[in-house]
Amino acid sequence: MKTKKILAKILFIIPIAFGTHSCNTLKFEYKKQISEDISESKIANAGHDDDAEFIINAADCLTEQIFLGNLAKKNGSIYGVKYSGEMIVVSAQEFLREVIAIGKIEGALIPENYSKKIIRTYEELSSKSGKEFDEVYCEVIINLLENAIIQFQIASTDCRGTSIRQWAGSVVPTLQTNLAYARSCRQDYKITKPRNENQLSRR
């Protein structure tokens, strides 16, 4: 319960985007499958099942990026990690709003609950600080962005919906930029000294 309250405070935009959370006790994975089934039945053109699955997975991936980015801004000990978090939060929030809008148009029902993976990653990282946090964050966010790029690149060519293909392709360059910066942070976190956090707002 405590973890859920903390998550709600850190990621205020998600409840607004998704609406008020239900008290339904169904587990997330079950709800996600229900969402995929309903979404697939709603998408009008035959053969669009993969489109619905991508929309749902993209929303989950972007939500995780926002959680990790907020933790980096809070727990990072060096400027690079904090700024990486800010970059990711800004872009992922924008993309999340866009994919939710696309999902509504295409009939894809995005789950309201946070996935177990997001909660598990948050709990693991929120207990760390300093260089230990910097190191783990860099590895986790790099892996997440690498997988996201592959996922979005495939969607940009394989999804049947034109708007979904175009949107997925438009997201890839920003994901690549964020990945490159995160990789540079991994190289620097052991030797870089923390800078004044006020510098973040001036860049």
Image (cartoon, rainbow, N blue to C red):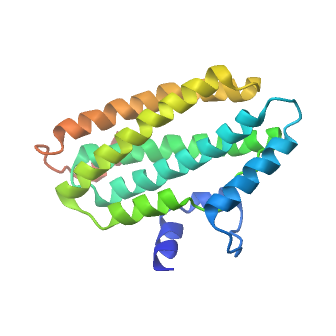
State the residue at coordinates (54%, 32%). Answer: 151
Q: Is residue 61 left or right of residue 161?
A: left
In the image, residue 41 lies at what x, y percent? 86, 44
Q: Along the line of sight, which residue is nearer the eye, 166 or 54? A: 54
Q: Quarter of the image holding residue 115?
A: bottom right
Compared with residue 115, is residue 173 higher up or lower down, i.e. above or below? above
Q: Residue at x 35, y 54 (%)?
A: 73
Q: Is residue 96 left or right of residue 43?
A: left
Outermost residue to the top: 157
Residue 35 drawn above or below residue 150: below
Q: Nearer the viewer, residue 120 or 16?
A: 120
Q: Is residue 10 above or below residue 163?
A: below
Extreme residue in the bottom direction: 1
Specify whether 77 is left or right of 55: left
Any part of residue 111 in sight: no
Q: Residue furthest left?
A: 191
On the picture, is 129 further left or further right than 118? left
x and y, in percent, of residue 65 in the image: 47, 48
**Residue at 60% of width from left, 58% of height from top?**
14
The quadrant the C terminus occupies is top left
Where residue 36 sits: x, y (%)? 73, 48
Can you tell which quarter of the image residue 157 is in?
top right
| Rendering coords of residue 74 (x, y %) | 34, 60
Look at the image and tell me whether residue 49 can be seen. Answer: yes
Residue at 41%, 56% (x, y): give it: 70
The mark total stands at 0
